[in-house]
Image: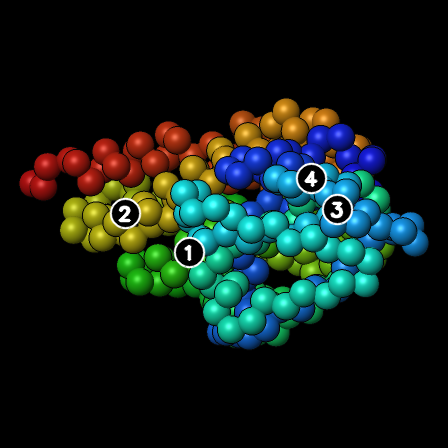
Amino acid sequence: MDPQKMPYLKEEPYFGMGKMAVSWHHDENLVDRSAVAVYSHSCEGPEEDSEEDSPLEGRDPDTWHVGFKISWDIETPGLAIPLHQGDCYFMLDDLNATHQHCVLAGLPPRFSSTHRVAECSTGTLDYILQRCQLALQNVGDVTDSGGVSLKSLEPAVLKQGEEIHNEVEFEWLRQFWFQGSRPRKCTDWWCQPMAQLEEMWRKMEGVTNGVLHEVRREGVPVGQRNAMVTAILASLTTRQTLRREWHARCQSRIARTLPADQKPECRPYWEKEDPAMPLPFDLTDVVSELRGLLLEPTP
């Protein structure tokens, strides 16, 4: 990362620590209490400022730092630790769980290498592919209208399918495309798996449409209908909220200032009345309809 080529870096918002290269966060999907090691190489000259030349308060803005603070606490002062060429720092035991960290930009370019012990029961490609296959086990034959029939209308099965639908959309597809095109200049390895996940996600849109068809079908007992609505309503409400947030993030002022290869892409995205998609991108009306069904009096 070269801060001189990144004028859009944000200011650290709580303690006046200066420009942030990486915002406050925890490292996730790690083995509990496992160590995190970070090697830092900054392209500094042979001579560095002495402590006598450093300001008495605050941090030297020319030097890279790692910042630490207690999680979700902006009252207790944070700590900024300088990182010089060749430094390595470690987050041991439960530090990553109890504290958040950020990277504060210095003046010279910097390379870093982070080493973690990944928790592999979730968060891997094999894991999400198996989850998608589980959701799609409920898909039956294609109907005469081009939709899909469902093997089961059991609320637990419907609820699980919609939760997986959200997981692949927001934890995988949108996360991937938000990075822009720059990572694909380094490797195109992820393009095929993401295309596979997107195709499975597209089938899940058809599953959701199939559930809604059953909910709207005349003659369905009110109790059964309400059970189906209750099973899917929370997931669809979350989906609508997160889609709105992701779309706004991709259209934000900061996103518009990024270089072309770093601009986030809001994907999947489609316009209203797209014939290729069974449901709209904006689920506001669908969620309102489902809530209305639950409010209808029982005969």
Q: Which residue is mark 4?
A: 55
N-terminal of the pair, mark 3 or mark 2, is: 3
Q: CA distance from mark 3 to mark 2?
A: 68 Å
Q: Please, what secondary structure does the residue beneath circle 3 have?
A: helix
Camera-nearest residue between 57 and 105: 57
For discs 4 and 1, the disc positioned in front in the rendered view: 4
Q: Work out whether residue 113 or residue 61 is closer to the camera in this orientation and state it.
A: 61
Which residue type carries mark 1?
A: Glu
Asked if residue 10 is positioned above or below residue 215 in the image, the reply reads above
Q: Is residue 291 among what the camera can see?
A: yes
Q: Quadrant of residue 92?
A: bottom right
The Cα–Cα distance between marks 4 and 1, rounded to whole angstroms, is 52 Å
Amino acid type, mark 4: Pro
* Mark 1 / mark 3, whichever is N-terminal: 3
Tell me, for residue 229, which label it has, or none: 2
Residue that label 3 marks = 52
Secondary structure of the residue carrying numbered label 1? helix
Q: Which quarter of the figure is the C terminus placed in?
A: top left
Disc number lying in front (2 or 4):
4
Q: CA distance from mark 1 to mark 2?
A: 14 Å
Crowd class of label 4 (few under 14; some 14 to 19; many from 20; radius 10 Å): few
Q: What residue lies at 33% left-to-right and 47% top-to-bottom? A: 234
Tag 2 secondary structure:
helix
Residue at the disc numbered 1: 163
Q: Nearer the viewer, residue 10 or 87?
A: 87
Q: Earlier in the sequence, mark 2 or mark 4?
A: 4
**In the current view of this chain or complex, which residue is farthest to the right?**
46
Quick one: label 2, few (<14), some, or many (20+) residues within 10 Å? many
